[in-house]
Image (cartoon, helix red, strand yellow):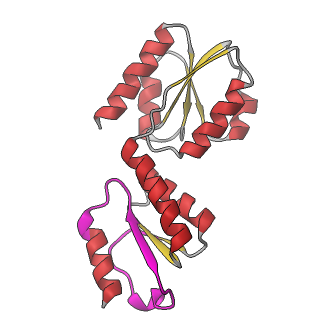
Amino acid sequence: CPRVKEIHQKAQELEKKGYQVVIVGDKNHQETKGILGNIKEGIVLGKENDLKKIKLKKRIAVLSQSTQDIEKVAKITSLLLKNCEELFFVNTICVANRLRQKEVEKLAKKCKAVLVVGSRKSANTKRLYEKSIRLNKNTFWISKPKIKKERFSKFTSIGIIGGASTPYDDLEKIYKILKK
């Protein structure tokens, strides 16, 4: 993704300007590792509690893994703001992912069940699932387009959403199974 390359460049640029680079993300995710690999010193925060384990400098720059949840990034950034003199924030969450996150919230509130379709290894699919399950306990993570219609027959409305790399054909197959 060209956007990820931009995040790498921005992290380098901000570090050169004297900022301590803080990345909100999953420390074991390839994208986060890639950002860290392009700067001399960087800190990854995966959750609010991680703040207790780090020493912040006076000037920090906050970026995030492109698939992060915007609410999580906002919470961590507001906590960081209380602990530094200067904070430079760059919204590096992918626009398509932000739109999907908003859409899954609507589906979770509107539908009796939500099927989040995508790989178990996909960070953005994971975010969609987490967002949906918080709002609707009848959220199911579907990794393959092979489902049993009977499992979902009790639900009068079902929302279907896919992660960024989920083939549209997979969503179509699931829709057709449910429509039978």
Q: Which residues are magenta?
A: 141-169
145 or 138, which is in the foreground? 138
Residue 139 percent coordinates (x, y): 53, 72
In the figure, 165 relative to 139: above or below?
above
Q: Is residue 5 above or below residue 148?
A: above
Q: Furthest residue to the left?
A: 169
Q: Is residue 166 magenta?
A: yes
| Image quarter in which the C terminus is found | bottom left
Where residue 72 appears, x then y in whole percent?
Answer: 61, 43
Instruction: Determine the residue located farthest toward the top in the rendered image.
Output: 17
Is residue 23 toward the left or the right of residue 98 in the image? right
Query: Nearest the camera: 122 or 68?
Result: 68
Q: Quadrant of the N terminus?
A: top left
x and y percentages locating residue 95 in the rendered image: 39, 42
Image quadrant in which you'd find residue 163: bottom left
Residue occupying image coordinates x 37% and y 20%: 9
